[in-house]
Amino acid sequence: MSEQKVVLYDGPAGGWGALRSVGNALLKQDIPLKGAKTLLSANQPDGFDCPGCAWPDRNHASTFEFCENGAKAVAAEATARRTTAEFFAQHTVTELATQSDFYLEDQGRLTEPMVYDAASDKYLPIAWDDAFALIAKHLNALPDPNQAIFYTSGRASNEAAFLYQLFVREYGTNNFPDCSNMCHEPSGSGMRESVGVGKGTVTLDDFELAEAIFIFGQNPGTNHPRMLGELRQAAKRGARIVSINPLRERGLERFADPQDKLQMATMGDSPISTHYFQLRIGGDFAFVKGMMKHLVELQDAGEDVLDHAFIAEHTIGVEAMLADLRAESWALLESECGLGAEHIRAAAEVYRQAKSVIACWGMGITQHQNSVATIQMITNLLLMRGNIGRPGAGPCPVRGHSNVQGDRTMGIWEKPPVALLDNLQKVFGFTPPQAHGFDTVESIQAMLDGRGKVFFALGGNFAAATPDTVLTWKALRNCDLTVHVTTKLNRSHIVHGKAALILPCLGRTEIDMQASGAQGVTVEDSMSMVHISVGINPPASAQLLSEPAIVARLAAATLAGRSQTPWLWLLEDYSRIRDKIEAVFPDFKDFNARVKVPGGFRLRNTASERVWNTESKKAVFKTHQVPTGTPLQRARERKGDAIVFALMTTRSHDQYNTTIYGADDRYRGVYGQRRVVFAHADDIRDLGMKDGDWIDFHTVWDDGEERRADGFKLVTYNIPRGCLAAYYPETNPLVPLSSVAANAGTPTSKCIPVLLTAHQRA
Ligand SMILES: Nc1nc2c(c(=O)[nH]1)N[C@H]1C(S)=C(S)[C@@H](COP(=O)(O)OP(=O)(O)OC[C@H]3O[C@@H](n4cnc5c(=O)[nH]c(N)nc54)[C@H](O)[C@@H]3O)O[C@H]1N2
Ligand SMILES: Nc1nc2c(c(=O)[nH]1)N[C@H]1C(S)=C(S)[C@@H](COP(=O)(O)OP(=O)(O)OC[C@H]3O[C@@H](n4cnc5c(=O)[nH]c(N)nc54)[C@H](O)[C@@H]3O)O[C@H]1N2
Ligand SMILES: [Mo]
């Protein structure tokens, strides 16, 4: 770990710093040579899909695209370290519970299935068939299948996800919480109502044509580094790039492209954003509404601003929305977003002057109580000038996990569409459950009050990724059985049910050998491109199974005698699974043939063709009021404006969600530490504190429960007053379980009302 310090980072994002950091990542994992070869196979037509993020590649067939965080994700999986049965023999679970998240994953890849033994408080080896039999016994003993909960993290392939949802529905429930519930769920809910599709409509080609690109609440320098290459190209050809973010993120300001030999040789870098609006946390709704109000004012003053032909042919609801915008108060919009009308108008002018506009967004938009309304406002803004369904324009929610979008396409959804259930019935000859299941927050509540008894996770780190840590851990410990399919040891294996299993699986970089030979799996990126991923490394251990194998063998064990699905036959050759996917989803016609083409194919996206799959068969302008009674407003009414802060929980540069690679956050100038909180200098002063002081956080919430997180160091930062930022997952104990996005259920981890007090050392 590096020395603890905070310094101003004034270099560009990317560049040599990124290359150096990758070198360090490989060395730390003891894999310099193999690692380098592995890296060169990421996102190649005959290689594996990078497990780093869901940003698409140019053709998925071009030369190696260097990406610092992709390289770290690959190195983490290709590590030479192993967490063996001997390791578990040496440590009780109580001992492991005292270790950090970093330590747990740093032990390396798991090598064989393990079962918790209460007598010794240790995990012991178990044979695969015994593990499946144990799970089957628990599942089949439940009086109601809805007492079992099946979580998915977004790395699972289409093939694994498809088999999984089939197994769980044949078993009898739609309890499919997934990481998407904590991530882009509001994008799906909001856009489906507005334009009939819950996915972005743009492709990389549109990024070459857009005249303006708006980036709301997203930090691509850290989380989607390859997106910076697109933004830089766009900036170079004169497109305007507008960042809307409470923090000045380095990657949104300047970037040196590791792909660009000239820039690397000359230490040059290019500006990214032409405009930067530092609004208040949660101020996006008001900001976008203000942009729209400016457009209407221009229109009313006689300028031709709106795309009338598009609006007349393709939309409904415009009159009500325009009336609402005319009546809206500038003063309210300004005070909500913390920026004067002149700034909002300036952003609106960039929008108006561009012939084609893309709007991107990330977690800064989705993890709020009001996120669905904000996303519908962004969609309204695009619709006003016909910026959907034509070249260079459209909405672009930038997804996180590399196959989170594909998992949803495959039916990992607690609210399955009727057409999916009908097709499953036709193809597989059983009656799927119709009732909606639990999402992530509902699952935690169900486990807390005894309605959920068995918890099974296909990947991820539920105990660390979810809100309200104290309650969530209680919920998991309440279960009769917890099971985790996983590559590495993490918190969720330590916070376990009365019985517990760890089932280690192959990672995407590894060769997946089945009866018919080595298999590839498919994934769908953030722009609906589906392509094949083939592992190249020997498995980390001979005892690992692939995720499809774990699901198929578990299904065969659990549903023996009552399922007509040929589970083990499907497993022999994944193209058989793809044939079934094609049979259930018409959009996957000729799946096996189309996925053989280098680069794969794009799934149909009706909104991008201006076909609107909404009830009215039109795109819908949704009218929304500035939110009142939000958790923050309620807290401020109770405790006073001056002392209640809005806390965002976000990612550092050295982590992949709950996987902590190291303690540096290079672009924000933080080294050797994670327990920091970014605050405005004047707020620190008004608290009677100074930079470097230690504080404790307390959530202001209405249910009487105490939520706190202790021991964070104040760091003076360029952030609006009243706003704070700290890292997740350390701050998850502060996020109330019952504070979720309306109509999406997403925990509101970007806007927690908190009080700060001087740190009380134990
Ligand atoms: N290296 C790496 N890559 C990743 C991940 C990772 O952890 N590490 N995670 C993956 C996953 S699952 C996801 S979902 C994505 C996440 O990628 P992002 O969407 O970039 O997520 P965060 O890091 O949480 O950053 C949120 C951004 O929103 C800003 N923000 C916070 N509150 C507000 C607000 O109220 N308004 C506005 N306008 N901005 C706000 C923050 O300052 C920050 O810049 O990345 C994926 N890629
Ligand atoms: N406070 C706060 N909370 C948040 C967020 C936030 O911004 N703030 N972000 C939310 C978001 S956007 C998301 S997506 C969730 C993430 O929630 P999850 O997806 O549940 O968490 P991850 O940390 O991505 O999961 C990491 C684990 O996945 C396992 N793993 C890695 N590769 C594989 C594989 O190939 N197969 C299997 N089976 N397992 C594998 C490893 O054991 C690793 O420990 O967290 C959410 N929680
Ligand atoms: Mo995510």
Image: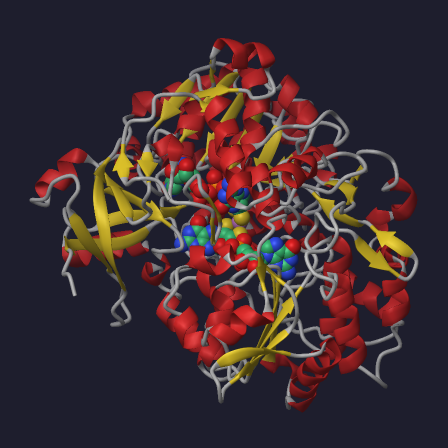
Q: Quadrant of the C terminus?
A: bottom left
Residue 569, image quadrant: bottom right
Residue displayed at 62% across by 43% down = 74
Name of the residue lying farthest toward the left? 688
Residue 262 image offset from top left, x and y in percent: 57, 9
Residue displayed at 34% across by 55% down = 731
**Can residue 109 be seen from the camera position used here?**
yes
Residue 755 image offset from top left, x and y in percent: 19, 55
Up-down relation of residue 357 to residue 522 (above or below): above
Q: How many marks?
A: 0
Closer to us: 44 or 110: 110
State left or right for residue 249 relative to residue 156.
Answer: left
Closer to us: 438 or 305: 438
**Can residue 575 be seen from the camera position used here?**
no
State left or right for residue 508 relative to residue 474.
Answer: right
Residue 5 image offset from top left, x and y in percent: 26, 37
